[in-house]
């Protein structure tokens, strides 16, 4: 296995992701834990020293133990990792002074060929992503230069004899398009064969959960979404009935959703499940509320109370499990105070662990969405479930602009079900990031049979997206849209007009509120 020593870079997890994509197992450990004894016990086949915010010339800046360089295994230093490596092996690092580089840079080859760079520079200079203030001023003995950029004469350096490699840029980020090749080369040099699988990840994750939790009881909030579901099934496999799930039914779910969730978890997986049927409390609290933010806040507040109440009845619980993913971790760090905070605080039941005196278990914290789906498949969750479109925490409340009533929710549920059924029948579900109906707060005049109607209008929404941050409208055919409109008007009482929302994001958001 491979050891990543983390010096606190924002993108350390991306290194792990790149290695997993190359079917290689690695572990990230913070530099404080990596002592000489730790190293000998871990016995890594290769070591990567990550980037980080510290400055090597500063007294007390973090260092790995010198033993890293005495293991006889390949070592790759990235950014801060490069600098720390140079300094410890006898080179010199200097502070900024006009050579800082942030963002894209172009690296050109220098010197002779290097095994780490196989497949690089085939079409000229390589684009890379830099983020450094300090720079290497003198190479350590044994090192040579293999690539340079305008601000980093030592962009790529190596001691090929000892298989020590040190680069100033970040090969793990998207903006270094050929970075993956560099990691593949490094793994090959270290003798990895790429035989690690999601099955192995599952076994390791289970061992970690057992080690963290011991005999204690764990509560897991289940939303019906993919993340919390995968977390719950994984936890159940690890600790069995020490786990209890709490599923808060706020009355704002889609048609059949509550039955699907309880059926799958309680009946199929035999996971102890509290189905908190609190529809009335939520709908009563929402009576007369039409401002979108007010709605969200009302639901968020009540959700925390209700969850706490039900979870509080589970005796002896010491842990709260959350399906937090790595992007949630980065977002809450880098966008703190930004517009995504409200979304996240609801989504992650933020603040609850402290309020309830519970410790956190977050078994998906290192994973990205597509990896969670792969893990879910590995755990045997059905494909139709894993491929589900995202559904927002406040549920149908934000798809029903204006005041919410039980009648309106019922009409919306029916329309949404017909729309989704149409999409599935036409085989389009997996091409779309998210599709749903919104019930508009206006009634319009229509004619059906020989009579006049005066009913609600609904808007259909369907978008493609990679991460929900931006989105394009899905280009349905005209036939599909007219067929769907006809079905909704025929099958749903209370709707006599259907529109298709053709706004991308930005300027629109995906949800209507
Ligand atoms: P917007 O509407 O902001 O939505 O373009 C982007 C993505 O986030 C989802 N969303 C939420 N998810 N709690 C959630 O868990 C929320 O409060 C929330 N609001 C929006 C939305 O469905 C879309 O996928």
Image: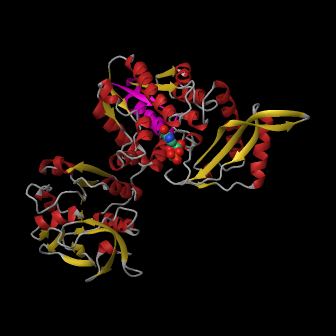
List x then y, in percent, for residue 285: 52, 22
List x then y, in percent, for residue 74: 23, 64
* Residue found at the very far right of the displayed protein: 450
- Write down the quadrant of residue 343 in the picture: top left
Is 159 in front, or is 134?
134
Q: Is 125 in the magenta?
A: no
- Write down the quadrant of residue 186 in the picture: bottom left
Is 177 in front, or is 131?
131
- Picture quarter with the C terminus: top right
Q: Is residue 200 visible?
A: no
Looking at the image, which residue is at 42% across and 81% down?
A: 123
Q: Is 225 in the magenta?
A: yes
Is 382 in front, or is 354?
354
Looking at the image, which residue is at 58% across and 31% down?
A: 253
Q: Can residue 282 be seen in this view?
A: yes
Q: Report the magenta stretch's main SS.
A: helix
Residue range highlighted in magenta: 217-242
């Amino acid at each position: 296995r491979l050891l990543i020593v983390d010096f606190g870079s924002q993108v350390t997890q991306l290194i792990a992701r790149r290695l997993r994509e190359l079917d290689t197992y690695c572990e990230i450990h913070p530099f404080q834990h990596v002592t000489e004894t730790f190293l000998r016990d871990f016995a890594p086949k290769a070591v990567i020293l990550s980037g980080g915010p510290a400055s090597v010339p500063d007294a007390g800046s973090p260092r790995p133990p010198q033993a890293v360089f005495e293991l006889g295994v390949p070592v790759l230093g990235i950014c801060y990792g490069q600098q720390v490596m140079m300094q410890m092996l006898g080179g010199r690092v200097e502070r900024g002074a006009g050579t800082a580089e942030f963002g894209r840079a172009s690296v050109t080859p220098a010197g002779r060929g290097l095994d780490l760079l196989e497949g690089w520079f085939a079409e000229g200079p390589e684009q890379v992503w830099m983020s450094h203030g300090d720079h290497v001023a003198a190479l350590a003995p044994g090192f040579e230069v293999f690539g340079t950029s305008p601000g980093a004469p030592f962009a790529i350096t190596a001691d090929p004899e000892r298989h020590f490699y040190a680069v100033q840029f970040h090969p793990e980020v998207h903006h270094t398009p050929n970075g993956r090749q560099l990691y593949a080369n490094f793994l090959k040099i270290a003798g990895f064969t790429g035989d690690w699988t999601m099955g192995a990840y599952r076994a390791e994750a289970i061992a970690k959960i057992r080690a963290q939790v011991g005999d204690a009881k764990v509560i897991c909030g289940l939303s019906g979404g993919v993340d919390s579901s995968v977390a719950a099934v994984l936890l159940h496999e690890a600790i069995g009935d020490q786990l209890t799930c709490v599923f808060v039914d706020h009355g704002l779910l889609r048609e059949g959703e509550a039955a699907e969730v309880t059926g799958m978890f309680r009946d199929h997986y035999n996971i102890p499940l509290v189905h908190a049927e609190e529809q009335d409390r939520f709908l009563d609290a929402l009576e007369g509320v039409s401002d979108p933010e007010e709605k969200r806040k009302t639901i968020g507040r009540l959700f925390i109370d209700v969850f706490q109440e039900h979870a509080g009845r589970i005796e002896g619980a010491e842990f709260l499990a959350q399906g937090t993913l790595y992007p949630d971790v980065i977002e809450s760090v880098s966008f703190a105070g930004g517009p995504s905070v409200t979304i996240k605080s609801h989504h992650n039941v933020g603040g609850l662990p402290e309020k309830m005196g519970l410790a956190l278990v977050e078994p998906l914290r290192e994973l990205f969405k597509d990896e969670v789906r792969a893990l879910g498949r590995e755990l045997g969750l059905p494909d139709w479930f894993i491929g589900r479109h995202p559904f927002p925490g406040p549920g149908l409340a934000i798809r029903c602009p204006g005041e919410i009533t039980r009648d309106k929710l019922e009409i919306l549920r029916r329309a949404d079900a017909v729309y989704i059924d149409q999409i599935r029948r036409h085989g389009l579900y997996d091409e779309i990031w998210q599709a749903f109906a919104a019930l508009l707060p206006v009634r319009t005049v229509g004619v059906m049979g020989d009579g006049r109607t005066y009913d609600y209008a609904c808007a259909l929404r369907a978008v493609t997206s990679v991460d929900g941050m931006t989105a394009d409208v899905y280009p349905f055919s005209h036939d599909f849209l007219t067929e769907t409109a006809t079905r909704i008007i025929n099958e749903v009482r209370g709707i006599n007009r259907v529109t298709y929302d053709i706004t991308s994001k930005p300027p629109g958001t995906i949800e209507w509120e």
